[in-house]
């Protein structure tokens, strides 16, 4: 089995795959200072509940946008699972696509690989994470560039922290845009504001490229917006994890 690790700014997601089929996944909060031992305590308990043992793991791959966390995640793979992990961005890890953009996050490149291998190109991949990102994949699978906007939860938290009389709210659709009290007004502003941003940004990207593009939504909050955003044609919450499994297979094939 393959252990895939997607380390984002908010959460570290661990998945276990057999081939390209996901068996199980778990989510822990990101902390660059968390040691390999601390990861292992939580992860071993979760794996035991799923009846997966360390001996079942025969490979690992890591994508991280938190450089300080990579070393301890590598140690986790080596010391507790007995495997040397591949790390996106390090030598020997083949993506199979051309990267025309600069400084693209590892998770976004993985999404581009997974999206292109499944659906071809051109594509827009909208990832609802710490940031809301729109990654552009060309007709040949190349990563052309991206648009980055503040993530929805980040916007909610900023509004709460900046306003003395504004509460922390949950994100959910409202029947009306105009709220008659503070909480409905905030929910409408956040939700419908993001709906219009998403739809408007997709229109602008299509107009700028001149391409008829499929759109894939991923990330934990993606399902919340699919009904209100007709441009979000495909929803694949596990796109990054699936892409890591694909890249591991590709890299192994290159070695053999």
Image (cartoon, helix red, strand yellow):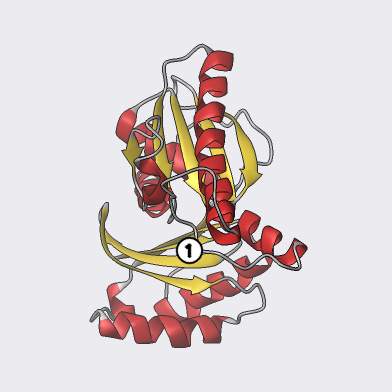
Q: How many marks?
A: 1
The residue at the far front in this view is: 180
Is residue 193 shown to the viewer in this render?
yes
Q: Which x, y percent locates residue 40? A: 47, 83
Q: Which x, y percent locates residue 250? A: 37, 44
User: Is residue 45 shown above or below 115?
Assistant: below
Number of other residues with Cα within 10 Å of mark 1, as a class: few under 14, some 14 to 19, many 20 or more:
many
Which of 206 and 108 lies nearest the eye of the viewer? 206
Mark 1 — residue? 85
Q: Which x, y percent locates residue 86? A: 49, 58
Find numbered disc 1 in the image and state the secondary structure of the residue it sits on. loop
The residue at the far top in this view is: 210
Q: Name the residue located 35 percent from the left edge and 47 percent from the top edge.
A: 246
Which of 28 and 234 lies nearest the eye of the viewer? 234
Q: Locate the N terminus by quadrant.
A: bottom left
Looking at the image, residue 56 sits to the left or right of residue 199; the answer is: left
User: Is residue 239 shown above or below 216?
Assistant: below
Q: Name the residue located 59 percent from the left edge and 51 percent from the top edge.
A: 151
Looking at the image, residue 101 sits to the left or right of residue 7; the answer is: right
Looking at the image, residue 147 sits to the left or right of residue 54; the answer is: right
Q: Name the residue located 61 percent from the left edge and 28 percent from the top edge.
A: 100
Is residue 93 shown to the viewer in this render?
no
Q: Which x, y percent locates residue 146? A: 60, 33
């Amino acid at each position: 089995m393959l252990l895939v690790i997607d380390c984002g700014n908010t959460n570290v997601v661990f998945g276990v795959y057999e081939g390209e089929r996901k068996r199980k996944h778990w989510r822990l909060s990101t902390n660059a200072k968390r040691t390999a031992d601390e990861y292992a305590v939580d992860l071993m308990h979760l794996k035991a509940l799923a009846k997966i043992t360390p001996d079942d793991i025969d490979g690992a791959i890591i994508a991280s946008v938190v450089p300080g966390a990579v070393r301890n995640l590598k140690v986790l793979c080596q010391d507790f699972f007995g495997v040397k992990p591949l790390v996106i961005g390090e030598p020997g890890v083949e993506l199979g696509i051309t990267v025309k953009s600069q400084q693209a996050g590892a998770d976004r490149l993985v999404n581009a690989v997974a999206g292109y291998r499944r659906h071809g190109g051109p594509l827009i991949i909208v990832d609802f994470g710490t940031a809301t990102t729109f990654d552009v994949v060309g007709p040949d699978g190349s990563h052309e560039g991206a648009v980055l906007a503040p993530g929805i939860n980040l916007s909610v938290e900023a509004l709460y922290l900046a306003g003395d009389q504004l509460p922390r709210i949950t994100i959910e659709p409202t029947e009306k845009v105009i709220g008659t009290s503070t909480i409905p007004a905030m929910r409408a502003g956040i939700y419908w504001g993001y709906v219009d941003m998403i739809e408007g940004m997709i229109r602008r990207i299509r107009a700028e490229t001149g391409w008829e593009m499929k759109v894939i939504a991923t990330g934990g909050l993606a399902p919340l917006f699919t009904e209100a955003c007709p441009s979000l044609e495909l929803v694949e919450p596990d796109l990054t994890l699936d892409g890591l499994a694909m890249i591991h297979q590709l890299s192994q094939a290159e070695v053999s």
